[in-house]
Structure formats: C-alpha cells, structure tokens
Image (cartoon, rainbow, N blue to C red):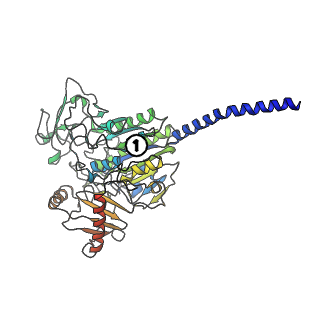
C-alpha cells in the first residue's frame, strides 16, 4: 500500500512540476497585461490665453469655473508654474519637444500658411509615448505649421501632426483669427467640395470674398489692421482666403465640434492607454462663445468664453468617468501663456472687466517678459497617485516630457528633449521641491531662480515692438535697454528694479542664462 501511495504521490508531484512552466508563463503574461492596463491615460488641456487669475480656483469671483475647480480641489494646484514662453507657438513647441523654443529660430508666432515647425525626425512627446503602446491624438488649435511651405489645401496636407507622432488629429490649422477658416482632419480639409477648391494667400488678396478693410460694415467685431482681411462668419481674419465655401467653420460651433471629436477618441481607445492633447481655441480671439454661454458673465465674450472652456473640460472629464477611466488618467490642465484683453478685435474685454484680474497680482500678460507672461494656472489631477494639495514649487511645461518618460520607464536619448528635466516627484507630490531655475521667453529671455527674476536688456527692435504692443494691447512687455532684476518674494508685482543696486546678482544670473543657451545636450 505504501508503495502504491508513493507512486501516486510521485505522479501528483510530476504532474504539478509539468504544470509549473505553463503557470509561470501564464503569470508572466498576466503581469505584462497588468502593466499595459495600468499605464495611465494622459490628457493635456491646453487653454489659450488663460491668465493666472481667470479661474475660481485661482481667486476669480466674476466668472464660475466649477469643472476646472473640481480638478484643482482633487489634485495639485501649482502657484508658480509656467509656460516656457509668453506666446502660443513657442509654448506648444516646447511642450511637445522638451526643448526651449529659442533654440529653433522659426519658433515664433506663425502665419497661417507656415510650414511644419517640428522636424519630422525630431523626437516628440507623442512619439515617445507610442513606444510603450499609447494611442495619440491632438484635437483643437494647432498653430505649429503644416506642410513644407507650399500647401495645396485641396490635396493631402502633410507633413503635420501625423508625421510627428499623433495617430489622429482634428485641427484648426493655425488659429481662429487666421485663414484658412476650415477644419483639418488628419491630412484633409473637412467638407471641402472639389467644385469649390480652397486657396490661401498671406501676401496679397485673392478671390472676391469681402474683407474687413474694404467692407467694415460686414464685420461683427471691429478688427485692428492686422485682422482686417478676409471675412468669414462675420469676422475678418489675418490673410486672404478664396473659395472653399463648403468647408468654412462656424466659430460658435467650436465648443461642440472639438468636444465630440475628443470624446470619440476616448471611446475608441478606452481599452488601451491613450494620450489626448487638447489645445483649446478658447479664450483666444475672436471670442465667439455659443449662445448657450452668452451672458453667463458680466464680462462680455471673454468672460463667457471662459465659462465655455470650463463646460468643455467638464464634458471630457465626464467621458472619462463614463468608462471608469478618470482615476487612472493623468490630467494636466494649463495655459500656453498669460492673459490678454485687447488682441485684435474690439469685444469690450477691457471695458467690461470690472474688478476681475485676469493675471492676478502679476505684472504684464501675453507677450510680456514680466511674470504674467508665463505664470499660468496649472493643475495635475491623477487620483491613483496624486493627493490633493497646493504646491509653490517652481515648475515649467518643458519638463512634462522627461517627467512622463521617467514615470513610464522610457529611456531618453542624449539629444532628446534636451531642456526637459525629471520633476516627476514634484508633479505628483505637492510637498516636493521643483526647479532650481527656469527660462522664460518673450520678446527676449528672462530667468527665474528662487526669488530672483532677471530680464535681459532689449535691443532697439524689441524696444520698438514694446512701444507698439503697449499702445495696441495695453500690456507692459518688460523690454528695457538695460537689464532688470526683481525679488519676487518681496515684490511679486515687479515694481522695484534692483539691477543698479545689485550688479553682482545680475552678472550671476546673466552668466547662468548664457551657459544654458550654449548647452546642446540633455542634463543626465
């Protein structure tokens, strides 16, 4: 009997041993599957021209932003976070490449027919995320150029977002105030009729469409000289557009069109990790919120556009909730630069401002080297990892690239994202310190280090631009013929220039900035 039992035991053990490789393989497969499913989705809400003081979570009382405020309440609200530049194109460039825009001479505000700014061989954030299985999309305002400089809008328009790492794109090709006033889905203009081909020119008038300078009685908002060309939907734009009538957008429909496209992408990719880059048109000019939002504030179209932006944010967050994705989604909510009121059209943004302070206590605004040029609302929401809090860490959008790579264990090459630093701990923990220093780009460069703010001297051309912008937009862009130095701890509104009293500190910061400008590789 003992002999028979021994045989049975040996058989059982042998059977178990035979099963072990199979079990091990199954466990390994299960672990790999878990690793894939545990990758957080990533959504970047990139609002246009939203100032530090434009949200309830940052002190606004004249406008209600409950959906964004909820993200701030349940995530980390940063008080000293910055876009890399005080204007839209260079900020977008830096976020997607991890590289300061001043290293690319073309990374300035682009015309509507500019070629693609990001080289197709350049590493990008979406390319990096695709390495580990992410589906990627951009929905909204692009303004990073398209094609090779000679775009035929009636054919496939490329290179564009698909060539730099996005699987799907639905765009305003440039901005709302620039032609062509059409949507571009992947490589093609939406709803364009072959019988009515589209043409665009930024040098001289083409076609017979009315213009703002010839037909001022046809415009709904009085434009400045730069925005008085072809009229589309009652708004004169930058540049001339001929034909293409079937493809025209209606500005008031942006809120629903872009929301639907973003939510469709989430639905289609809910079973795998995805990256959605959502660069809003709001609250950029022309401000034309849908009638559902008109009159929601006493500040006119600009205030109502903020309410519209908040509604869009809520709709996309609700889509994440619908599929139980919210807890495992990193949401970064921020802006491409500070606020501007009068930026090309008369829409009473200044007249109806009341007590609202779009840039909070900070000096300047969009275009400016002062703090309000780049200090913008920034919120991280990621329930699976982030505990709610408020962080005063010095942060910059250029570090999003390396920080996400670090979190997802994706190695970066020495020449990839050369200005991006790993600040994962600070992004996900309000108690962690941030950057030692950041570079801020506007008409020139500035450097923040701790309490200190150094602004480089302006040349004659920048001084002329300062005068023009201050006159037209009522913004101090911070350009002086001599260097400027401010202590932001004691003087957050930059009222007292200390440069003449502290030449040694000026020299120290100028030397650090020069060293950073000369650097050509990532800090390891």
On screen, residue 401 above or below 391: above
Looking at the picture, tell me which residue is in the foreground, 331 or 65: 331
Location of residue 372 in the rendering, given as x and y in whole percent from the top left corner = 30, 59
Judge whether residue 495 can be spotted in this image: no
**Residue 347 location in percent, x, y?**
23, 48
Quick one: which residue is furthest to the front in this view? 3
Q: Quadrant of the N terminus?
A: top right
Residue depicted at 42% across the width and 44% down the height: 43
Compared with 315, 190 (above or below) is above
Q: Quadrant of residue 315?
A: top left
Badge 1: how crowded within 10 Å, few (<14), some, or many (20+)? many
Q: Give residue 181's position: percent from left, percent from top.
A: 23, 36
User: In this figure, what is the number of numbered marks?
Assistant: 1
Q: Describe residue 18's horizontal placement relative to residue 393 as left or right.
A: right
Residue with the mark numbered 1: 128
- From the viewer's perspective, tell me whether residue 451 is left or right of residue 21: left
Q: Left or right? Give the position of 296 relative to 470.
A: right
Vertical comparison of 401 with 432: above or below: above
Q: Residue furthest right?
A: 1
The answer to whether residue 405 is seen in the rendering is yes
Where residue 302 sits: x, y (%)?
A: 29, 49
Is residue 45 shown left or right of residue 189? Answer: right
265 over 339 or under it: above or below: above
Taking depth in this image into account, of 27 and 482 the one nearest to the observer is 27
Q: Quadrant of residue 145?
A: top left
Q: Residue at x 27, y 73 (%)?
A: 498
């Amino acid at each position: 009997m003992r002999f028979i039992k021994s045989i049975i035991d040996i058989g059982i053990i042998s059977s178990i041993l035979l099963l072990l490789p199979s079990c091990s393989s199954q466990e390994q497969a299960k672990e790999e599957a878990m690793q894939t499913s545990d990758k957080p989705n990533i959504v970047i809400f990139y609002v246009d021209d939203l100032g530090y003081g434009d949200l309830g979570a940052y002190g606004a009382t004249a406008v209600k932003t409950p959906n964004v405020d909820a993200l701030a309440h349940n995530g980390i609200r940063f008080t000293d976070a910055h876009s890399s530049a005080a204007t839209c194109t260079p900020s977008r460039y830096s976020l997607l490449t991890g590289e300061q825009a001043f290293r690319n001479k073309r990374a300035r505000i682009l015309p509507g027919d500019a070629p693609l700014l990001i080289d197709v061989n350049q590493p990008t954030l979406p390319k990096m995320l695709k390495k580990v299985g992410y589906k990627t999309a951009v929905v909204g305002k692009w303004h990073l150029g398209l094609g090779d400089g000679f775009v035929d809008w009636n054919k496939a328009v490329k290179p564009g977002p698909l060539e730099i790492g996005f699987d799907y794109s639905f765009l305003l090709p440039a901005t709302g105030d620039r032609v062509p006033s059409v949507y571009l889905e992947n490589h093609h203009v939406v709803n364009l009729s072959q019988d009515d081909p589209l043409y665009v020119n930024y040098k001289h008038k083409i076609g017979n469409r009315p213009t703002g300078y010839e037909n001022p009685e046809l415009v709904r908002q009085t434009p400045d000289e730069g925005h008085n060309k072809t009229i589309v939907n009652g708004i004169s734009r930058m540049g001339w557009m001929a034909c293409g009538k079937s493809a025209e957008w209606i500005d008031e429909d942006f809120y629903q069109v872009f929301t639907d496209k973003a939510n469709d992408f989430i639905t289609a990719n809910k079973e795998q990790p995805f990256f959605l880059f959502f660069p809003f048109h709001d609250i950029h000019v022309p401000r034309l919120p849908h009638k559902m939002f008109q009159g929601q504030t006493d500040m006119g179209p600009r205030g109502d556009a903020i309410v519209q932006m908040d509604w869009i944010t809520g709709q996309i967050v609700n889509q994440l909730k619908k599929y139980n994705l919210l807890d495992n989604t990193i949401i970064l909510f921020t802006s491409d630069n500070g606020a501007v009121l009068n930026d090309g059209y008369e829409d009473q943004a200044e007249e109806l401002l009341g007590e609202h302070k779009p840039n909070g206590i900070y000096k300047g605004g969009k275009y400016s080297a002062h703090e309000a040029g780049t200090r913008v609302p920034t919120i991280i929401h990621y329930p699976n990892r982030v505990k709610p809090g408020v962080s005063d860490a010095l942060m910059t959008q250029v570090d999003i690239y390396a920080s996400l790579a670090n979190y997802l264990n994706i190695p970066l090459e020495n020449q990839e994202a050369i200005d991006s630093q790993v600040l994962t701990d600070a992004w996900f923990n309000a108690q962690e310190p941030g950057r030692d220093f950041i570079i801020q780009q506007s008409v020139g460069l500035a450097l923040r280090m701790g309490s200190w703010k150094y602004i480089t001297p302006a040349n004659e051309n920048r001084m002329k631009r300062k005068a023009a912008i201050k006159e037209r937009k009522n913004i101090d862009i911070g350009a002086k013929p001599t260097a400027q130095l401010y202590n932001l701890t004691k003087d957050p509104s930059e009222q007292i220039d200390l440069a003449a009293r502290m030449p040694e500190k000026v020299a120290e910061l100028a030397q650090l900035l020069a060293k950073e400008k000369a650097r050509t590789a990532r800090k390891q």
